[in-house]
Image: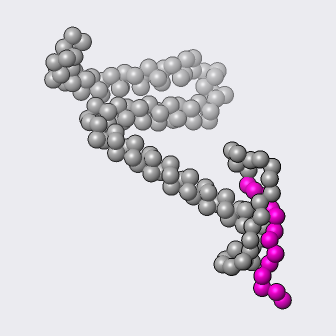
Amino acid sequence: MDDSLPATPIRSPPSMDDHDEDVTVEHTSGPRKAMSGEAVAKDESKARKIMMRVVFGAMMIAAFLALLYSGHLYVCILVAVMQICLFRELVRVRYNAHYTTIEDTIPLFRTTQWMWFLVAIIYTYSDFVSDVIKSNTALHSLG
């Protein structure tokens, strides 16, 4: 049996710049020697996915560290935005799970929940906002 496999034309995985060209892969050595053309393409797409995840993970970590470096106010804004996104998802899940009951019996279900959330946010953050306005002389025209 011959150990060297001939070059096999395979279809490249779909990408942003797909030009309908065949790619030739040399099966000469290593773990890909025993793999078919489809398996090599699948393996390369896995590597590409992993690389994309690593790159975007590093970008998110860098953005988070930049946000931490920028100061207290921006961290508080991040926390508030995350709370809003979390509450939005919880309202959506509850609404979808109990849609038939809610639609018939509770008028303005989402509006009521969002108004209570707004009241809780104002109650929670009002002291912080007033302290920021009092301590920053440029913002005294707001208070």
Kindly indicate the quadrant of the structure image that contains residue 13: bottom right
Which residue ends up furthest to the bottom in the rendered image? 1
User: Does residue 67 appear in this view?
Assistant: yes
Which residue is at a point 19% across and 14% down the rendered structure image? 140
User: Going by the image, does 97 lie left or right of 64?
Assistant: right
Relative vertical location of residue 94 with respect to residue 42 in this rendering, above or below = above
Which residue is at a point 51% across and 19% down the rendered structure image? 111
User: Going by the image, does 140 lie left or right of 125?
Assistant: left
Which residue is at a point 22% across and 16% down the rendered structure image? 139
- The answer to which of 117 and 36 lies nearer the viewer is 36
Kindly indicate the quadrant of the structure image that contains residue 119: top left
Kindly indicate the quadrant of the structure image that contains residue 45: bottom right
Q: Position of residue 118 (x, y in %)?
A: 40, 22
Relative vertical location of residue 74 with respect to residue 60 in this rendering, above or below = above
Q: Position of residue 33 (x, y in %)?
A: 72, 77
- The answer to which of 113 and 124 lies nearer the viewer is 124
Instruction: Characterize the magenta stretch by its predominant secondary structure.
Output: loop
Q: Position of residue 20 (x, y in %)?
A: 80, 49
In the rendered structure, does residue 102 fall within the stretch colored magenta? Answer: no
Which residue ends up furthest to the right in the rendered image? 1
In the rendered structure, does residue 10 fall within the stretch colored magenta? Answer: yes
Image quadrant for the N terminus?
Answer: bottom right
Numbered range of the magenta stretch: 1-13
Image quadrant for the C terminus?
Answer: top left
Q: Position of residue 97 (x, y in %)?
A: 62, 35
